[in-house]
Image (cartoon, rainbow, N blue to C red):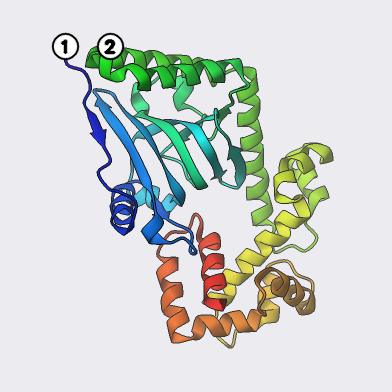
């Protein structure tokens, strides 16, 4: 029987490769390279194999970012999920604020029906893409963003299976390769429902609940860690461990207040007082707000508004607003940094 045919990425590093990569990925995600990256040096390379019920990719590249916001999900729905294994480099992911660093050997589940963001300074990896409806329900439900590490025996075993599939797929028939994929997905379904992975899932859900609660209370200057502990019904130490990657609860809430105020300032008219925007985002005084804003953005709130109202700045701002709301704050912050420079 015929083996799966290899499809090679045909573009050498450079601007043509970047344009082709953006065109391909735009079907699923918004993607970009860092502002200071040279397009002439952009690299994306790899190979893939199409199977009856899956797509196997081995690829890598230079620094890049990808995001699948709610806007992208609504506009470009996809009934797929992914098992992604980091082989070289590092990948940072963000699942509704839960930030994770993935290193070689890590395997993460991505559900294309849910938002996520990723960035990397350079990577090599294996991606197994499959229809969500075709796999065991244990893998379909509540696994988005869960990780198996190489130190986890089930993670090491799953990684061995993925690497073996890549190594032998061209020596197997299409039927044999698909059977191996089906077995990999059954094993993954069992591996991602162990107590350890359930604990990671519960941590992700708790963070999402905590961040959602906090965002609803950002206009209240009295809402802080003690109030969040009471609402969530968790210990103070557990809450602080949850927000430790963000520098703690207070720092995270300050950052969220400043992000929200920045977007409000850029949308506001000159007659909308800065003091009112400060109060709306939980700052007790305009002076406190201005100091915190200046420290984060290196410009005053009024200067940020002037930059946005400049014709060139406004055109750039309108462009980034159209890129989606899921990571809108990050986009606008990046825009302000660029416009300020």
Which residue in the protein does label 2 denote?
176
Labels 1 and 2: the sequence-earlier one? 1
Which quarter of the image is occupied by the C terminus? bottom right
User: What is the spatial separation of the Cα atoms under label 1 and label 2, in whole angstroms?
Assistant: 10 Å
Crowd around label 1: few <14 · some 14–19 · many ≥20 (10 Å): few
Residue at image position (48%, 86%) is 310
Question: Is residue 107 rendered to the left or right of residue 243?
Answer: left
Residue at image position (42%, 45%) is 61
Which quarter of the image is occupied by the N terminus? top left
| Depth check, front residue: 19 or 284 | 19
Residue 57 in the image: above or below residue 229 = above
- Where does residue 39 sit, x and y in percent of width and height? 38, 60
Whether the residues at callouts 1 and 2 have beta carbons within 8 Å, the answer is: yes
- Where does residue 266 sit, x and y in percent of width and height? 54, 76
- Where does residue 94 sit, x and y in percent of width and height? 56, 45
Q: In the figure, residue 2 lies in which quadrant?
A: top left
Mark number, residue 246:
none
Which residue in the protein does label 1 denote?
1
Look at the numbered disc 1 and give the secondary structure of its residue. loop
């Amino acid at each position: 029987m015929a083996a799966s045919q290899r499809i090679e990425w045909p573009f050498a590093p450079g601007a043509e490769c970047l344009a082709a990569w953006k065109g391909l990925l735009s079907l699923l995600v918004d993607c970009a390279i860092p502002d200071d990256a040279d397009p002439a040096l952009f690299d994306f390379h790899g190979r893939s194999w199409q199977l009856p019920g899956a797509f196997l990719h081995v690829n890598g590249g230079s620094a890049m970012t990808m995001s699948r916001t709610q806007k992208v999900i609504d506009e470009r729905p996809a009934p797929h999920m992914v098992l992604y294994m980091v082989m070289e480099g590092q990948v940072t992911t963000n699942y509704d604020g839960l930030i994770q660093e993935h290193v070689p050997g890590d395997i993460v589940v991505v559900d294309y029906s849910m938002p996520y963001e990723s960035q990397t300074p350079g990577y090599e990896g294996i991606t197994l893409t499959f229809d969500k409806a075709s796999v065991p329900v244990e893998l379909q439900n509540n696994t988005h963003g869960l990780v198996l590490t190489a130190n986890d025996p089930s993670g090491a075993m799953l990684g061995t299976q993925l690497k073996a599939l890549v190594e032998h797929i061209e020596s197997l028939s299409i039927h044999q390769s698909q059977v191996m994929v089906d077995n990999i997905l059954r094993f993954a379904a069992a591996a991602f429902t162990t107590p350890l992975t359930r604990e990671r899932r519960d941590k992700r859900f708790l963070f999402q609940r905590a961040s959602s609660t906090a965002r609803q209370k950002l206009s209240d200057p009295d809402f802080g860690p003690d109030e969040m502990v009471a609402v969530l019904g968790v210990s103070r130490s557990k809450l602080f461990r949850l927000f430790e990657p963000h520098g703690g609860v207070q720092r995270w809430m300050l950052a969220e207040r400043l992000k929200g105020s920045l977007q409000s300032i850029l949308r506001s008219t000159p007659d909308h007082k800065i003091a009112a925007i400060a109060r709306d985002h939980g700052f007790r005084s305009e002076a406190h707000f201005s100091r915190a804003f200046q420290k984060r953005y290196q410009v005053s709130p009024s200067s940020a508004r002037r930059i946005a109202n400049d014709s060139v700045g406004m055109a750039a701002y309108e462009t980034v607003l159209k890129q989606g709301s899921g990571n809108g704050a990050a986009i606008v912050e990046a825009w302000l940094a660029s416009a300020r420079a």
